[in-house]
Every structure is written in structure tokens, then in C-alpha cells.
Amino acid sequence: MVDWVRLELDVDGFDEAVFEPYLQRAQGAGIVFTTMAELGDTAEHRRALYDLNRTCSADIPERGTFYTYDEYVAQRIEVPSFEASGVMLAVHDGRWVGMSGTSLHPDKGYAFSEMTGVLAPYRGRGLSLALKLLAVRFVRAAGYRRLATFHHPLNASAIAMNRRFGFVDQPAR
Ligand SMILES: CC(C)(COP(=O)(O)OP(=O)(O)OC[C@H]1O[C@@H](n2cnc3c(N)ncnc32)[C@H](O)[C@@H]1OP(=O)(O)O)[C@@H](O)C(=O)NCCC(=O)NCCS
């Protein structure tokens, strides 16, 4: 059985100013940040999101076979918790190079960080932190105070990224 690393961010205690430089640096380097809602939740953009998610997910340890496109749409997009305005995108020269998707769970009282991924050539430049900053703004605007996620214990880069951002181990409930 996998001992998942369950993390949570206290949104109230999060200081946006600390991570604002990552956003500005990326924008200065020609990265455009937008959302699925801004671009339009169209068939073409769903396919682009799927392609980006699938490519990045190939680097998640023990991820296994990724969804088919139809499975992805049915299980990740056409679900009540999906928010097109919660899908942050980093675009470079028209190419989608990074994403961070956040779903909302009013029944559980928290937002959930679904998938953050950056294409390999764009890693190590703070793009994930910039995307997560935008995700926190989305979570705040939606009125949530907790952002949760979990990772396979072997996914060291994702766990380090979230800890760097301020996520801590989820309190036992
Ligand atoms: C995890 C991932 C999103 C990080 O994206 P990134 O844009 O390269 O990350 P950043 O440059 O913003 O780095 C942010 C922090 O993460 C940590 N980090 C990132 N890559 C790391 C690595 N390979 N090893 C250790 N720590 C790492 C560091 O703490 C870093 O902060 P620092 O540079 O101030 O030390 C990227 O590696 C990825 O897409 N991985 C595959 C998909 C995945 O596993 N997603 C998470 C599951 S939802």
C-alpha cells in the first residue's frame, strides 16, 4: 500500500508577496499566464490540456497508464468540481508549457490542487511557483481557506515544490 504524502496550505497565512517575483520573472522572460476559462473551455483546448497533463504526468513516479482522452474528459473535466477558471496555464510562444489545476469541494470545505506540471525544458525556473501563486488567488477569490494535495512518496520534486511553497503535512482528522 502506498503511504501518500498528504499536504495542505493555510491560504489565510500565505504571503503572496514572497512568490510574486517568480511570476514577474517568468512574465519578463516571455511567459504568458492565463486560464482555461479565459482561453475558452473548447474541444481544442481540452485536447491541449490533456496533452500537457499527459506529458507532465509521465514523470510522476508510479503514475501508471494515463487516461485516454475520453476518460480524461469524463473523469477530470466533466465533473462538478472542475473549474475552467481554476486551470492556470503558462504559455510560451503560443505553446502551453505549464499548468496548475485546482478543483473546489464545498462539501469538504477545501480546494484541491489536482495537477501541477511544467514541460521538462521549462523546469527549474520557478514556473510551478508562479502557477501556484495564481492558484492561491483563485482559491482565495472562491472563498476557500484550505488548499490540499497529495503525492506519491517518490515524487521528490513535487513534494519539495509544495513544501517550498508553504504546504505542510495535513493535520490528522
Ligand atoms: C514538480 C514540477 C511541477 C516542478 O516544476 P518547476 O517549474 O520545475 O519547479 P520550480 O522551478 O518552480 O521549483 C520550485 C521549487 O520546487 C523544488 N523543486 C523543483 N524541482 C525539483 C527537483 N528536481 N528536485 C528537488 N526539488 C525541486 C525546489 O524547492 C524549488 O524551489 P527553489 O528553486 O527555490 O529551490 C515539475 O518537476 C513537473 O512537472 N514534474 C512532473 C509532474 C509532477 O510530478 N507534478 C506534480 C504532481 S501533481
Image (cartoon, rainbow, N blue to C red):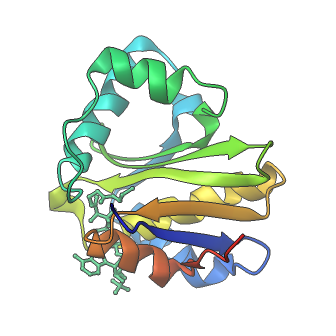
Up/down of 31 relative to 43, above or below:
below
Q: Is residue 95 visible?
A: no
Quadrant (top left/top right/bottom left/bottom right) for the N terminus: bottom left
Q: Quadrant of residue 158?
A: bottom left
* 17 or 105: nearer the viewer: 105
Q: Is residue 133 visible?
A: yes
Left or right, 82 with respect to 54, comes to: right
**Which residue sits at x=51%, y=43%?**
34
Question: Which percent across, then down, holds residue 15?
Answer: 69, 81
Up/down of 41 relative to 141, above or below:
above
Question: Which percent across, then down, holds residue 150?
Answer: 47, 62
Up/down of 43 relative to 126, above or below:
above
Q: Quadrant of residue 151?
A: bottom left
Left or right, 123 with respect to 173, comes to: left
In the image, ligand 1 is in what quadrant? bottom left
Quadrant (top left/top right/bottom left/bottom right) for the C terminus: bottom right
Up/down of 134 relative to 92, above or below:
below
How many numbered marks, from 0 up?
0
Judged from this view, the residue extending furthest toward the right is: 143
**Which residue sits at x=24%, y=66%?**
123
Judged from this view, the residue extending furthest toward the front is: 1
**Which residue sits at x=53%, y=61%?**
149
Q: Quadrant of residue 31?
A: bottom left
Question: Which percent across, then down, holds residue 76?
Answer: 47, 30
* 152 or 112: nearer the viewer: 152
Question: Which percent across, then down, holds residue 115?
Answer: 43, 50
* 79 or 143: nearer the viewer: 79
* 40 or 94: nearer the viewer: 40
**Which residue sits at x=68%, y=52%?**
111
Left or right, 99 with respect to 11, comes to: left
